[in-house]
Amino acid sequence: MKILVAIKRAVDYNVRVQLKRDGSGVMTDGVKMSINPFDEIALEEALRIREGGTDAEIVAVSIGPDAAQQQLRTALAMGADRALLVKTENEVQPPLAARALLKIVEEEEADLVLMGKQAIDDDANQTGQMLSALWDRPQATFTSKLEFEDGKATATREVDEGLEVIRVELPAVVTTDLRLNTPRFVKMPDIMKAKRKPLDTRELGDLGIGETPTVEVTAFEPPPKREGGHKVETVAELVSELRDKGLIG
């Protein structure tokens, strides 16, 4: 089995995000960058599939700037067999990411694609679904449990109504939810070994899919500050307050 794990370079989840003064984006200079946490869960699941007895090659893939090699090296230290960086300095939106991943998936002849259900920077939750549609293969999104048998994957999905269990034929796209697993801690010897593992790079333009963003972002702004609360004496007063604020009709 060949498992392709898509990972994204994102601001570390422990960092308090700040906007640039001109509102053109998020400040990243001197800010710690890490693997998107949901993608890290996807990589951990790939490693557990292999450790469970499946003969699998794990390939970590990222689309982004040259600095994303750092996150790919972390993926190699966790246990990925090799890594590939598709280089671009431009913004990578979900449609572009899905088309680029499709090219890599087809070249690698992947049996399974694992990725996080969303990235914590844009919360788009679109790339996995788009890749599945372009690839014309089944998808199992928001997965919190994953099992394999007879060339099929059984996925437990977290949906609004609770849990849903589906079975999909491989090859397939699986996006991972928070409760699927807890990623392992990377040890120093593994970091040193990762330096000897293959990490290939290629230009996004060489894939022949174009690099034009489909959505133009004009400005960023912080969420409004929360107002202080106050107590009300009666239910009628509460309803009146909510109606004045336009929260109820």
Image (tube, grey):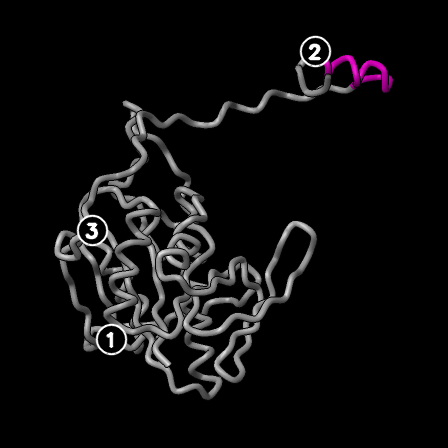
Magenta includes 149?
Answer: no
Q: What residue do we see at 33% from left, 80% from top?
A: 57
Task: Say few, some or many: other residues with alpha carbon within 10 Å of mark 2 (under 14 / 14 to 19 / 20 or more).
Answer: few
Label 2 is placed on what type of residue? Asp
Q: Is residue 147 left or right of residue 21?
A: right
Stretch of the chain drawn in magenta: 232-243
Snapshot quadrant of residue 43: bottom left
The answer to whether residue 160 is above or below residue 190 is above
Residue bearing the label numbered 3: 209
Task: For mark 2, give the secondary structure.
Answer: helix
Task: For mark 3, give the secondary structure.
Answer: loop
State how far apart marks 3 and 1 are (Cα): 35 Å
Residue bearing the label numbered 1: 192
The quarter of the picture where the N terminus appears is: bottom left
State how far apart marks 2 and 3 are (Cα): 51 Å
Task: Please identify, in this view, whether the residue under mark 1 or under mark 2 is nearer the observer.
Answer: 2
Magenta includes 239?
Answer: yes
Q: What residue do we see at 28% from left, 48% from top?
A: 96
The answer to whether residue 243 is above or below residue 153 is above
Q: Which of 21 and 137 is in front in this view?
A: 137
Task: For mark 1, give the secondary structure.
Answer: helix
Residue 106 image position (x, y, % from top left): 27, 68
